[in-house]
Image (spheres, rainbow, N blue to C red):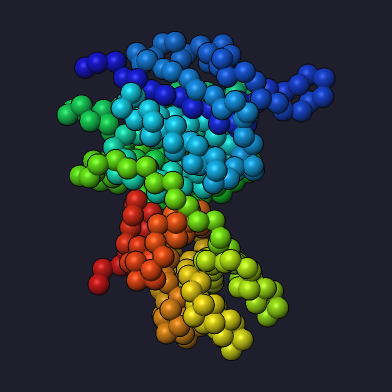
């Protein structure tokens, strides 16, 4: 079997930071020095090529234009490499992973995002293991010579998770990511144990880059006592095309008449409203209780068990591709990239 070629892309984030001895502040180091910090890279039977963003992007500054740049870079090199590892800040890693899953349509090769909670030059860093195992997973192939994980995934602290099923759940622990509604794709111990039943199969259609994102959306998290003027201000945002509602429990919200009317009026103006739960695990079941029964009547779409990150990026992708409400509804009633469990009819 020929040597695997892996493109290692450094976008920014804690994994690539060094502490300034004078100020104590973290600053990005030259990506070329990575091999000095991780000499184990030279032991890999893999052809590893590095690409660094000219200006590292802090995770909190990540935005759709960078997703387009990153997806375009991966797509342009798709035929030249067997897999891709993206070093990324952890705070918005799940958003980027979700966005890439919709932009890299019919992906047939691994795109593994990883990073760290401590800089890679720190003695107790989690960055080394995350980096080395992510590379190994990106290069892994099955007995047929096909990529073991032909999808966008996040690797952190011994666990490989589907990118668009992932959320960051801790700012203090190495085990920073979790997937409340979908099993791990793999777990790294003495060996890497893959759950083949959870991994997406090789696609039947040709790969396609989709960079058409519509960012005219809003995220509205409900809370007890939420004000009428605030809700109306959100739905009255000029140019608004879509709103993701983070509701209670299985998709429930206040039954106040003004709230339902605000939603209904927005939907009648063409604003797409998607209902997802604030809960870390579980699914929206619209109509299960009286507090969500009106949603089906007025045209609120169910996000089922999507994460917030997947809902935001899917909304951008769907509104970027479709303008007809029937097509938009259809897109949300199906899983485009393994991001949602759609109930059987």
Query: Which quadrant would the C terminus be assigned to in this image?
Result: bottom left
Residue at image point 67% right, 73% down = 233
Residue at image point 28% right, 33% down = 148
How far across and down, in percent of the image, does residue 4 sit?
A: 31, 19
Q: Residue furthest bottom?
A: 257
How far across and down, in percent of the image, does residue 18 sit?
A: 68, 22
Give the image quarter of residue 137: top left
Q: As drawn, is 11 to the left or to the right of 3?
A: right
Query: Which quadrant would the N terminus be assigned to in this image?
Result: top left
How far across and down, in percent of the image, does residue 63 sit?
A: 58, 45
Q: In the displayed structure, would residue 301 be above or below residue 16?
A: below
Report the number of discs.
0
Q: Is residue 323 visible?
A: yes
**253 or 311: which is nearer to us?**
311
Give the image quarter of residue 115: top right
**205 or 143: which is nearer to us?**
205
Q: Residue furthest right?
A: 22
**210 or 178: which is nearer to us?**
210
Residue at image point 38% right, 34% down = 75
Residue at image point 54% right, 24% down = 52
Q: In the displayed structure, would residue 148 be above or below residue 198?
A: above
Q: As drawn, is 199 to the left or to the right of 258?
A: left
Q: Is residue 124 visible?
A: no
């Amino acid at each position: 079997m020929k040597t695997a070629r892996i493109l290692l892309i450094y976008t920014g984030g804690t994994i690539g930071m060094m502490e300034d001895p004078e100020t104590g502040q973290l600053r990005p180091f030259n990506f070329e020095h990575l091999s000095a910090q991780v000499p184990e890279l030279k032991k890999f039977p893999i052809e590893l090529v590095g690409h660094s963003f000219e200006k590292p992007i802090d995770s909190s500054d990540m935005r759709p234009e960078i997703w387009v740049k990153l997806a375009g870079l991966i797509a342009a090199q798709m035929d030249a490499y067997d897999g891709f590892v993206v070093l990324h800040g952890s705070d918005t890693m799940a958003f980027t992973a979700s966005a890439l899953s919709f932009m890299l349509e019919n992906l047939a090769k691994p795109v593994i995002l990883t990073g760290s909670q401590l800089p890679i030059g720190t003695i107790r860093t989690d960055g080394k293991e995350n980096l080395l195992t992510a590379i190994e997973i990106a290069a892994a192939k099955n007995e047929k010579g096909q990529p073991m994980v032909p999808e966008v995934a996040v690797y952190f602290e011994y666990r490989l998770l589907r990118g668009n099923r992932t959320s960051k759940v801790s700012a203090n622990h190495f085990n920073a990511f979790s997937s409340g509604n979908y099993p791990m794709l793999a777990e790294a111990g003495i060996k890497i144990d893959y759950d083949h039943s959870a991994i997406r199969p090789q696609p039947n259609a040709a790969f396609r880059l989709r960079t058409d994102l519509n960012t005219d959306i809003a995220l509205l998290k409900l809370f007890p006592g939420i004000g009428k003027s605030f809700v109306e201000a959100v739905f009255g945002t000029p140019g608004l095309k879509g709103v993701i509602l983070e509701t209670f429990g299985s998709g429930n919200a206040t039954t106040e008449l003004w709230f339902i009317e605000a939603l209904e009026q927005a939907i009648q103006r063409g604003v797409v409203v998607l209902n997802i739960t604030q809960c870390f695990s579980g699914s929206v079941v619209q109509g299960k209780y009286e507090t969500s029964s009106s949603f089906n009547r007025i045209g609120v779409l169910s996000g089922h068990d999507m994460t917030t990150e997947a809902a935001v990026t899917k909304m951008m992708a769907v509104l970027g591709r479709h303008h007809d409400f029937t097509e938009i509804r259809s897109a949300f009633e199906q899983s485009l990239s393994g991001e949602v469990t759609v109930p059987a009819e």
